[in-house]
Image (cartoon, rainbow, N blue to C red):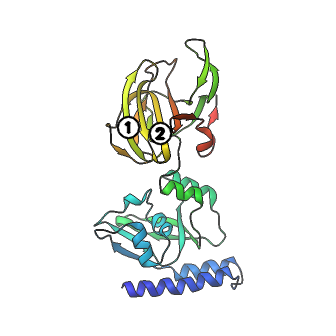
Amino acid sequence: MFLQYQQDVEENRILIARYRQGLYKNDTEASSKLAQSLTIYRYIVKSGDDIFSIAARCTIPYESIATLNRLEHPSFIQAGKEILLPSLPSLFIPETAETDLERLLISAHTEDTSFIIRVYPEGKSLELYCLPDQGFSGTERAFFLNTAFRYPLPIIRITSGFGLRKNPISGTIKLHEGLDLAAPIGTPVYACREGRVSSTGCNDLYGNFIVITHEGGWSSLYGHLSTIEVSLQSSVHSGTVIGTVGMTGQTTGPHLHFELRQDGKARDPAPFLPGKGSNR
C-alpha cells in the first residue's frame, strides 16, 4: 500500500507542476483535476514516529498532514493512533475554526482552486476545504510550532495598556508593565505560548498569579486570578487552561493582568499578539 501511496503522490506532484505552469484552461478545470487526484490513506502511528519523519517518508509537507488531522501541535501525533495521509500537497481548512491556527488559516486563505472533501476521522464525518499547493505562512508555522504568542482570554477587551499611567488605587504615576484585560470572574485563562510553569503564588500586588517561562528568554505573567489550575514546573501548550479570571490583589474590578518579559525586561505585549483587542 505504501508503494501505491508514493506513486499517487508522485503523480499528483506532476499535476501540481502543470497547475503552477498555468496549463489548465481555468481554475474550474484545475480544481476538478486536482480533486479527482486526491486520495486519503489511513496510517497507524508507530513508536518513534513524529509528524516530520512521517512527512519526509511520504514526501508530503507536514502542514498537509497537520491540517488534514486538525493537529494543533507536533506533539499531538501519538503512537498507536490512526492519522489520515493525503496524496496531494495541500492545506485542509474547516468551515468553523476550533484553534488559533485554524482561525489564522480561515482568515488568510481564499483560493479559487479550493474544493470540498469529506473525511471520517475516528468515525466522525468532517468537511474540509482542500487548497492544493498551499503551505503555512511564517505566522501559521509559528503557531503550529508554539513559537508565537496568543491572547490569554477568549474575548479581548483592553482596559489599560502598557506604559505610564496613574495607578487607580495609589494615585501615583508609574509604568504599567502589561495589559489589563476585562473579563467576568471565572473566565478561563489560557497559556499564551508553550512553556513551563516557573512560579505560582499570591501577593498584595498581583493576587493569585502564574509565571510561565518560554524559549528565547521570554516569560509571561498572569495576575489577579481567581483560581490556579496548573502545578509548579508543569509543561503547558499554547491554549492550555491555566486558571480563571478573578479579583485578587490590587484591583478595582475583575480582570486579568497580563505581562510579557524578555530577559527579565517588561515588553509591551500588544505588538507580539495576533490581531487587536477592543479598547474600553
Q: Are marks 1 and 2 in contact (CB under 8 Å)?
A: yes
State the mark number for residue 198.
Answer: 1
Above or below 105: residue 279: above
* Callout 1 amino acid: Ser
Residue at the image point whose x is 46% and y is 48% from the top: 215
Q: Amino acid at mark 2?
A: Ser
- Disc 2: which residue: 219
Q: CA distance from mark 1 to mark 2?
A: 9 Å
Between 216 and 177, the residue placed more toward the observer is 216
Q: Quadrant of residue 204?
A: top left
Few, some or many residues within 10 Å of mark 2 (<14, 14–19, 20+): many
- Badge 1 marks a residue whose secondary structure is strand
The quarter of the image holding the N terminus is bottom left
Residue 96 in view in this figure:
no
Residue 48 versus residue 76 in the image, above or below: below
The residue at the far front in this view is 263
- The numbered dot on residue 172 is none
Q: Residue 280, percent across and down?
A: 64, 28
* Nearer-the-camera pick, 41 or 218: 218
**69, 119: nearer the viewer:** 69
Q: Does dot 2 land on a helix, a strand or a loop?
A: strand
Question: Please, which residue is most extreme toward the top here?
Answer: 170
Is residue 208 visible to the viewer in this orientation of the structure?
A: yes
How far across and how far down the image is residue 239, in percent? 45, 46
Residue 246, position as x, y percentages in the image? 44, 25
